[in-house]
Amino acid sequence: MSEKNHQGKRTARQRLAVEREKQKASERRRRTLIVAATVVCVLGLAAVIGLLAANSGKSSKSSTGPVVAPSGAQGKDSLAIPVGQDGAKSTLTVWEDFRCPACKAFEAVYRPTLRELTGSGKLRVEYHLVRLIDGNLGGTGSLRAANAAACAQDAGKFPAYHDVLFENQPAETDDAYADNNKLVQLAGKVSGLDTPAFTKCVKDGTHDGWVDKSHQAFQAGGFSGTPTVLLNGKDILKDRTMTPAKLKQMVEAADKG
C-alpha cells in the first residue's frame, strides 16, 4: 500500500470518528432536554395529588359536563386517540399535556421518527390527553387545548392540530391556551380545520368531560409525570440510553417478528 493510500484511509477513519462523536453528542443533548423539561412536569403531579387528597370526600363526577368521546377514540372508555394502522405490531401509548414543556421537547425530538413508523404501518400511537399543568399552576389551558385537539379529531385533523399546539406552545406560566379564540385562531394553520363546527365544539367545551376522564385515568395509572411514553406497555423514557434511533430499531425488530 502506498503512503498516499495509507494516509487517505487514516484520514477517512478520522473523519468517521469525528462524525460519530458529533452524533453521540447530539443524542446526549436531546436526552438532556427531555429529562430536564420532564422535571418541571413531574412537579405538577405533586400539586394534583395534594388537590385530590383535599377533595377526597367529594364526588369524583366530572365538573365539566358529560363525557363525550371524540370521533374514532378507542381503548378502555374510548380515552385514546389513535394515529397509525390498527394492524401495527407495536403500540406507543403517549400521555401528554399541551402546556407541558417536556411534552413539547419529546415531540420535537421524536416526531420525525414517529411519523416515519406510523406512516410505514409499523407503529400505532395512542394519545391520551391530560391537564396536569392546570393543577400545578392554575388555569384551564391544558383542558381547553385538549378539548380543542379532541374537536380536531372529530374533523379528522388531530395529528396536524396536535403538532400545531406544541409548535405554538406558550410559556408554562402563560395560560394562553385558556382562550378559546386563540385555539380557534391556531386552527387556521391546519388546512380545512377552521370551520363553524370546529369553533362551536371548542367554545362549547364539547369534550371537556372526556378530558377530565382521561386525566383521572392518568392519575389512577400512578404515572409520575408527563410525558409518559409506553412502548407495548414499557416506559421507554426510563431508559437513559433511549434515542429515536433506538426506538426505531425496537419497533422494526417487533415488526419483523
Image (tube, rainbow, N blue to C red):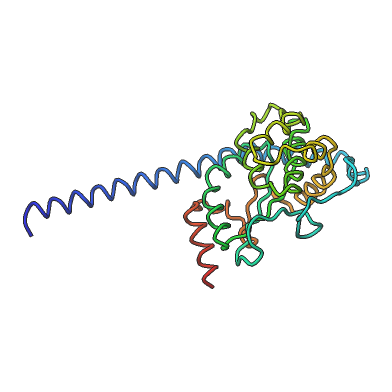
- Residue 203 picture location, percent across and down: 82, 34
Residue 51, quarter of the rendered image: top right
Q: Residue at x 83, y 42 (%)?
A: 208
Left or right of residue 142, residue 56 in this image: right
Query: Which residue in the rendered view is the most extreme toward the left?
Result: 2
- Residue 206 picture location, percent across and down: 84, 42
Left or right of residue 66, residue 83 in this image: left
Residue 92, quarter of the rendered image: bottom right
Q: Nearer the viewer, residue 45 or 116?
A: 116
Residue 48, quarter of the rendered image: top right
- Residue 245 picture location, percent across and down: 47, 54
The quadrant of the image that shows the N terminus is: bottom left
Q: Nearer the viewer, residue 4 or 55?
A: 4
Q: Residue at x 52, y 52 (%)?
A: 113
Q: Is residue 65 above or below residue 3?
A: above
Total marks shown come to 0
The quadrant of the image that shows the C terminus is: bottom right
- Residue 167 picture location, percent across and down: 60, 36
Q: Residue at x 71, y 38 (%)?
A: 44
Q: Nearer the viewer, residue 221 or 251?
A: 251
Query: Which residue in the rendered view is the most extreme toward the bottom?
Result: 257
